[in-house]
Image (cartoon, rainbow, N blue to C red):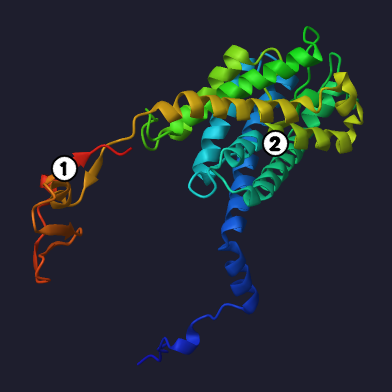
Amino acid sequence: MGSGCCFRSTNKDKMIPSPMVVRVQAILQKEMVREFLAEFISTFVMMVFGLGSVAHMVLRGNTLGSYFAVNVGFGFGVTIGVHVAGKISGAHMNAAVTFTNCALGYLSWKKFPVYILGQFLGSFLAAVTIYFLFYTAIMEFTGGILTVTGPIATANIFATYLPDHMTLWRGFLDEVIVTGMLQLGIFAITDKRNNPALQGTESVVIGILIVIIGVSLGMNSGYAINPSRDLPPRFFTFIAGWGTQVFRDKNWWWVPVVAPTLGAYLGGIIYTVFIGCTIPREPQIMENPMEYEDHQLPKTIPHHTTTSSLASVSVSTSNKSSIRPAPPANDSIRIQQF
């Protein structure tokens, strides 16, 4: 005969989480914390894919990268970012979009700094990640000389810079218009009252919108269209060895912050005023047609009826009431909501 041990599960065997774990779990359940983390991670994902595609184009040219590949990288980086955080924060990943949603009343202003902080930190960390992933390729391409302009410039891996054929204010106008197109498109794609993308495909359609903007309007200013995409990586290049030239070159650094914010706001207003406010409201189903009929009856009829969704109660002038079953739902009367 052999000997064996029998282990019996008891309540004492259950692991009791430590106070620290309980405290952390309670913090992570707070709405603003979850939204901060959602914006942080989704922006990080978008920027890693986007900046990585730019690194391929700059460091290897037509052999491993291309301008079209950059558009695809950023476009579908946005798509994955929406899947990461869409149900939690809306996956803005863009300070201009967040500002517009707050200014138009779709998001509380108290959440604005939470969203912006998450986006900026996520974008900055993505720049750090790409720098270390491509460090040896950057050093080989530049010979260890980190420059903003010239044939071996690599600062443009991380942020946008104005090309020679553009002036500062033409670039500003370009960013305003392009970001306005972005915001108008996002509102159209997600507006349930209009003709939105099919449920579950919104992220893909928004990603395609980014690709279309890039291939059609991206040449002039690099279509930053997002302060969260441009400023944090630019600041990283400042401290990583590219120096103050990242802010001095054509004094461009502030344009990808201000112009997209203005453009997104204008695009949101244009959609809201000229499209959103002109969409006819959908008919509303009245739960109790008896109430509608009572409004149509002459006031000389002695019985008045008030109804609820569960039963209709008829109250006579003799203060006696009787309850009868509510009419079936398919007999509901459709009325126009004004």
Q: Which mark is residue 2?
A: none
Give percent across and percent down for residue 215: 58, 14
Q: Residue at x 54, y 24 (%)?
A: 270
Q: Residue at x 62, y 57 (%)?
A: 33
Work out which residue is located at the far top of the displayed protein and give it. 165
Residue 181 location, quadrant:
top right
Secondary structure category for the residue under label 1: strand
Secondary structure category for the residue under label 2: helix
Q: Are marks 2 and 1 in contact (CB under 8 Å)?
A: no
Residue 3 location, quadrant:
bottom left
Question: Which residue is at the front of the view, 250 or 293?
Answer: 293
Q: Judge whether residue 65 can be spotted in this image.
A: no
Viewed as shown, does residue 304 lie left or right of 19? left
Q: Is residue 319 above or below residue 213?
A: below
Give percent across and percent down for residue 104: 57, 38
Quadrant where the N terminus is found in the figure: bottom left
Give percent across and percent down for residue 234: 80, 32
Viewed as shown, does residue 282 lie left or right of 179? left
Question: Which residue is at the front of the view, 319 or 245?
Answer: 319
Q: Is residue 286 above or below residue 256?
A: below
* Spatial CA span between label 2 and label 1: 50 Å
Q: Judge whether residue 288 can be spotted in this image.
A: yes
Which sits earlier in the primary sequence, circle 2 or circle 1? Answer: 2
Q: Nearer the viewer, mark 2 or mark 1?
A: 1
User: What residue is pinned by disc 1?
Assistant: 333
Mark 2 belongs to which amino acid?
A: Ser
Query: Crowding near pointer 1: few (<14 within 10 Å), some, many (20+)?
Result: some
User: What residue is pinned by disc 2?
Assistant: 228
Query: Crowding near pointer 2: few (<14 within 10 Å), some, many (20+)?
Result: many
Mark 1 belongs to which amino acid?
A: Ile
Give percent across and percent down for residue 55: 71, 26
